[in-house]
Amino acid sequence: MISLDDIEESYRPEMALTILILRVYFKRIEAVQIEKYILDHKIDWKLFQRIVFTHQIHPVIYKVISINASGFPAAFMEKIRNKSIKVATDNLRNLEELVRLNKLMKYGGVNNVPYKGVILSQFLFNDFLSRETSDIDFLIDKEDFSVAHRLLVADGYEPRYYNPDFMHQFLKSSHELMYRKTFLASPHKIEIHWAVTSKMMNIRLPNDFILSGQHSVALMGENVSVLNIEKHLLAILVHHGINDVWRTLRHCLDIAVLLEKYSNDIDWEELRLLTRKYRIYHTTETGFLIANKLFGILIPDTYQTKNVLDQNVLSNLLRFPALDKGKLHIANLRQQLYLRDSTRDKIKLLWSYFLAAFTPNIRDMEAVKVPGNSYFLYYLLKPYRILFKRRSIAKQEH
């Protein structure tokens, strides 16, 4: 594992404390080291709280420090306790809604599979409370989208943007749609996916392959079909490693817990072949290296490597403020390119980015509404929409 002294020196004591607490969670270090570290270092508690907030790891941090609270300010303990209770409450609300919507769509003829979110929390932590979630994700067949959309709208959900005149173009250019429904004072947010990632990411992981091999779990008295652990792992490797380039500790924690818990249940040779086939081997290798270097998690034999964890990837994960999430941010794009398997894959990614710059998408449809027979106008309007957005951002920065 990377030494805490190196993390402290290269980044901040607050980040080193965060990693220390997570190592205690994995039982790689004794809990008494937390109090000792706090006594030996001047901790900026507001900054530490911001790090935990940014990386969305309140429940796991609180699990550890609630029974090792010596040295933590009472005000900080109260804040993280309240946040963890809110996460638990929201997750249980999401679970209830997930089961209800799964049943609604299933009986409406839509094959739907909930994944990530509270389902992943149950896979990893054996509860629905230990992983921060913000929405409910369903994976469906593209052909079922119109039916799913009709069912959700009839149930009171409103799409972030959807124009039925352009459904064909929309399904080709996008891979998901967000819906909201206000329930009492707090909204429910769900995302319907018909692919695990966007075309811009240039990952050819077939939806029908991910949806194969489902199994049923009992949730709140209902049988709900979910992805098996291998397919769920592939989906989060794409989401965490390709979409989000391993920039948050929550995602790295997911992989670390999964490796620790399911190392004997996964056919790693088969997974290695699949990650090679779908061109996500390097991002997988990087995620496993992060789990090993930060938390001491053993890497499966088939992924043992002489390669070392790239310093830029580590820095983008541990530095604060965190790496910008914008896909076109130069540091983000550089990491996207690094995580690809080959030079050819890097070139394909850049080409996909180039095509995306000229292909209308949901953002363009949201910005301007054109008549149903005039989709071609979006090709003309898109450059102006992007230019206007950049000017607006520039004004806000100044």
Image (cartoon, helix red, strand yellow):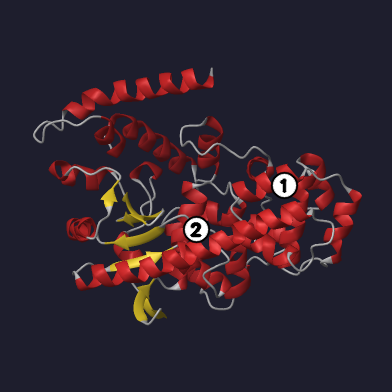
> Label 1: how many residues lie within 10 Å, few (<14), some (14-19) or many (20+)?
some
Residues under labels 2 and 1: Cα distance? Answer: 20 Å
In the picture, measured across the screen, residue 34 lies left or right of residue 66, that is right
Task: Give the vertical position of 96 relative to 198 (above or below).
Answer: below
Three-letter amino acid code of the residue under disc 1: Phe
- Identify the secondary structure beneath mark 2: loop
Residue under circle 1? Answer: 48
Between residue 163 and residue 82, name the one nearer to us.
82
In the picture, measured across the screen, residue 166 lies left or right of residue 92, that is left
Residue under circle 2? Answer: 133
- Identify the secondary structure beneath mark 1: helix
> Label 2: how many residues lie within 10 Å, few (<14), some (14-19) or many (20+)?
some
Q: Quadrant of the C terminus?
A: top right
Q: Is residue 233 visible?
A: no
Pinpoint residue 179: horizontal percent, then vertical percent. 31, 51
Pinpoint residue 75: horizontal percent, then vertical percent. 74, 52
Q: Quadrant of the N terminus?
A: bottom right
Q: Is residue 380 visible?
A: yes
